[in-house]
Image (cartoon, grey):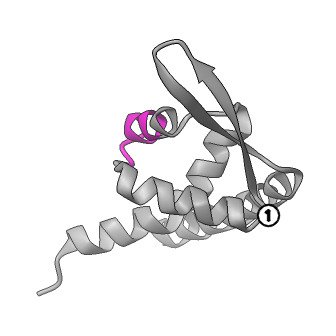
Amino acid sequence: MLNPENTKAQMRKGILEYCILTVLSKKEAYPSDIIEELKKAKLIVVEGTLYPLLTRLKNDGLLKYNWVESSSGPPRKYYALTEDGTNFLTELKKTWDELQNAVQQISQL
C-alpha cells in the first residue's frame, strides 16, 4: 500500500525552490531566517536540505550573497535574488497560479 506521507513529502519538495525564491523576493535573508519562514508555513526544512539548494540556485545565477559582519560570531552569508532570479520567480509564479487553478477546477468536478 502506498504511504501518503511519501507523496506529501514529494509535493513539498517540488515547490520548495519556488517558496525559497518567494521568501528572498521580499528581502535578503540568512539561511536560518529562510528555514524559519518555511517552518512557519509548515514546510519543514532542515539545513541539510536548504544549503545544497541555495548553492545550486546561486550557481544557476538566480541568487547572490554577501557577507555581513556579526556582533556575535563570524560573518554571515545573506542571500538575495539576482535579476535573473526575479525573472525566474515571475515565471514560476505564473505556473504555480495555473496549477493551483487547474487543481481547484478538478476538485470542484
Circle 1 sits on which residue?
91
Of residues 66 and 46, which is closer to you in this image?
A: 66
Q: Quadrant of the N terminus?
A: bottom left
What residue range appears in magenta? 35-43
Q: Quadrant of residue 41?
A: top left
x and y, in percent, of residue 24 in the image? 67, 41
Give the crowd class for mark 1: few <14, some 14-19, many >=20 residues within 10 Å: few
Q: Is residue 20 left or right of residue 7?
A: right
Type of residue at label 1?
Glu
97 up-or-down from 103: above or below = above
Q: Position of residue 18 (x, y in %)?
A: 61, 57
Q: Residue furthest front?
A: 74
Would residue 40 be counted in the magenta stretch?
Answer: yes
Q: Residue at x 48, y 55 (%)?
A: 51
In front: 49, or 39? 49
Q: Residue at x 72, y 57 (%)?
A: 93
Q: Position of residue 4 (x, y in %)?
A: 22, 72
